[in-house]
Each structure stands twice: as C-alpha cells, then as structure tokens.
Amino acid sequence: MENVTVFCASSPKVNEDFLVEAEKLAEELVANDYGIVYGGGAVGLMGRLANRALELNGRVKGVIPHFMVEVEWEHKGVSDMIHVESMAERKHILIEESGAIVVLAGGIGTLEELFEVLSLKKLGKVRHPIIIVNTNGYFNPMIEMLESMIDENFMRQEHAALWHVVNTSGEVCEALRNLPEWSDNAIKFAAVE
Ligand code: AMP
C-alpha cells in the first residue's frame, strides 16, 4: 500500500489538541513512507496535516471540487492537486487513490466521508482498513452509536471489524500493519438475517 487517505476537519477554531494530532499523523505517515491523500483544504486539521507533511518532504495529493477552489479553500502549496466537478467525484477519488482510510476529528463533512466508506465496506465494495483516531475521546458518542447498531441488530457482530479505533496518531501505522484483511465475500454477510 502506497497511499493513505485522511478525512478530517476543515475548522481552524477547534482545540489545539486536534490540530496537533493532524501534524502528528503527518509525521507518522511520512516516517512510514506513506503518501497522503486528502480533501485539498488549506485550513483546520486538513491544513495542518498537509503543511507538516510538506515540511517533511512527504507526498501529498489533494482532491478538491472547483466550487471550493472558487472560494479559495484550496491549499496553494500542494502541487499534486486533482480538481473535480462534484463532491461525489471527490469522495470516489479520495477512496480509490489509497489503500487505507484514517479519520481524525471533524464535523459533518468528515462524518459523511467516514460513513460512506463504512457503508461501502459493509457491502464489500471496498476493503480498506478504516482507522478512527479518537483524540481526547471526541468520537466516543459516535462509537457508542455504531455499537448500538450492532446491539440492536441493525448490523451483525462481524461488522464491528469494519472500523478500528486508536487513541493517537502514533498508533496508526502499527494498526495498519496488524489489521486482518476484510473479507472479499462481505456481501454474503452484509444483510442481517
Ligand atoms: P468538516 O468535517 O465538516 O470540516 O468537513 C471536512 C470536509 O468538508 C472536507 O473534506 C470537505 O469536503 C469539506 N470542507 C468543508 N469546509 C472546507 C474548507 N474550508 N476547505 C476545504 N474543504 C472543506
């Protein structure tokens, strides 16, 4: 696997811990020779992730729709930038360009991206490891919600392996090395029966 896709916040106004975690993820991925694929933004966790990776001479690829370029949201220092027409096309490329997904703290955009890839993986359309970095327990309510989907039989017990939670960015590459592969027969157990 050469590239890892990162979904994370665009907000710059969050607690500094979240922004620093994005820089630490850049350090972890560059040190382990992964290229970073991300949403192409210049601010928030996205900006801090890209800036730190570029400082370290890491490989960074952005994917951003034209309408965000028009409102100057694009990171101007990322030369490997793919411009697309729609959010759907952007998400498709963000997933297709890499072999794994890492999710840092974020808002509805980040959660939408995470839930799309979880849903595709449940249906066997992708097999990416999906690692959630649970900085300061930010994602605890969301993880509880996912677990109650299993407890209430909206998903099967096997689906707990769709995602993997770590506490810090420093644990991401070890998790990537050790996670078991997702079944290419996932569609066979996608439905609750
Ligand atoms: P959020 O977690 O809501 O901050 O959303 C992060 C995602 O939302 C990004 O991948 C983009 O799809 C989009 N997004 C929202 N605001 C921006 C921004 N200022 N610059 C770039 N992307 C943004």
Image: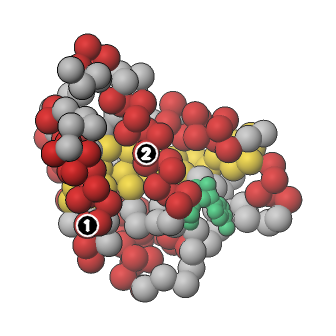
Q: Distance between the residues labelled 1 and 2?
A: 15 Å
Report x, y in % for residue 62.
Answer: 62, 50
Q: Mark 2 points at which residue?
A: 115
Determine crowd level at label 2: few under 14, some 14-19, many 20+ residues with C-alpha closer than 10 A: few
Residues at discs 1 and 2 in contact (Cβ within 8 Å):
no
Residue plotted at (58% across, 34% down): 92
> Callout 1, which amino acid?
Asn
Q: In this view, does 32 lie to the left or right of 68?
A: left
Q: In this view, does 14 lie to the left or right of 40?
A: left
Q: Specify the quadrant that holds the C terminus.
A: top left
Q: Specify the quadrant that holds the N terminus.
A: top left
Report x, y in % for residue 182.
Answer: 24, 27
Residue plotted at (65% across, 38% down): 88
Report x, y in % for residue 15.
Answer: 43, 85
> Callout 2, which amino acid?
Phe
Q: Name the residue under label 1.
A: 140
| Residue nearest the observer in this picture, 68 or 57 | 68
Q: Is residue 63 left or right of residue 104?
A: right
